Amino acid sequence: MSSPQKKVKTDYETRLFINGEFVNSSSGKTFSCVNPATEEVICQVQEALEDDVNKAVAAAKAAFAPGSEWRTMPSSKRRDLMLKLADLIQRDSAIIAEIESLDNGKPLAADWSTYGSTIDLHLVTQCLRYYAGHADKLTGTTIPVDSKQLVYTIREPVGVCAAIIPWNFPLLMFAWKLGPCIASGCTVVFKTSEKTPLSALYVCKLIKEAGFPPGVINVLSGFGPTAGAPLAKHMDVDKVAFTGSTAVGHQIMKMAAESNLKRVTLELGGKSPIIVLDDADIDEAVNATNTGIFLNH
């Protein structure tokens, strides 16, 4: 693993990313993005509400329509777009790691001496390259039957996906959900955490530069009740993936069921539980517990 280049200061992108363009919120509302280390306001970010959710979902639905550029794109081209995005993120890794550290609070750790946003960026590019390798290897199955008929299965993309991600690994969570979604040919609307919206918005610049068709990837900054909920309930969203609390996971399941019975993937719950036995090395146990709880500090 090589260390990223020298840190470079940058202007922050604060707009929503819908249909391949940066746009202001329909309502004109903004919210403060705060540095958790100093409690100073970094910038004002455009706040997505239901109208913005509707626009983003409409863009994703249009991008997924039969005959669209995305739906007719060879899987090898999807692979190449993902690899190009990974290369661009690696190129700008020092900038993005600095944004992530400022916005999220974890150390930069540019010398790899401890865990920090620099390592997160390395894992982001690894994740995208991993799933890029799957894009042209998604195959079906032939099934033997008691007749002369040919029976086979074929895997098809689910459709429009919603991805709601938390604050603790902002861009890595983004990559974990983006990778399989794009590799399989779906389109996606992200709702990032209101605590950490900035790194994903920077990467939207690179999504444009990589050449993804408009509407394939959309990113909204906002709050759960006013942006996440309309997304989870939207009738044109075919699947929702959520990482966060168990309580909100219950709400996501209910919203999915009461709308169009969309598919749901949930990552919920724990906060670094640890069991220390009588014969444990106490110093090691304390260090492990501290690392688990305060990794993002």
Image (cartoon, helix red, strand yellow):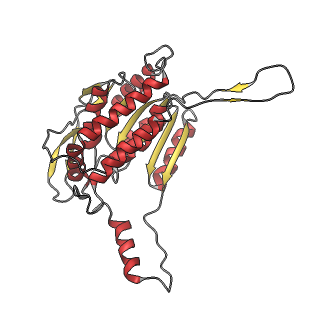
- Please provide percent x and percent y for residue 174: 37, 42
- Please provide percent x and percent y for residue 215: 38, 24
Residue extending farthest top: 67
Side (left or right) of 267 relative to 93: right
What residue is at 33 percent from the left and 44 percent from the top?
A: 223
Quarter-of-image position of residue 228: top left
- Please provide percent x and percent y for residue 91: 24, 38
Residue 274 in view in this figure: yes
What residue is at 44 percent from the left and 35 percent from the top?
A: 132
292 w.r.t. 209: above or below: below
33 w.r.t. 209: above or below: below
Asked whether 193 or 131 is in front, the reply is 131
- Please provide percent x and percent y for residue 238: 52, 31
Residue extending farthest right: 146
Residue extending farthest front: 2
Side (left or right) of 148 relative to 125: right
Residue 234 in view in this figure: no
Asked whether 108 or 256 is in front, the reply is 108
* Quadrant in which the C terminus appears: bottom left
286 w.r.t. 14: above or below: below
What residue is at 30 percent from the left and 60 percent from the top?
A: 115
* Number of residue marks: 0
Side (left or right) of 213 relative to 195: right
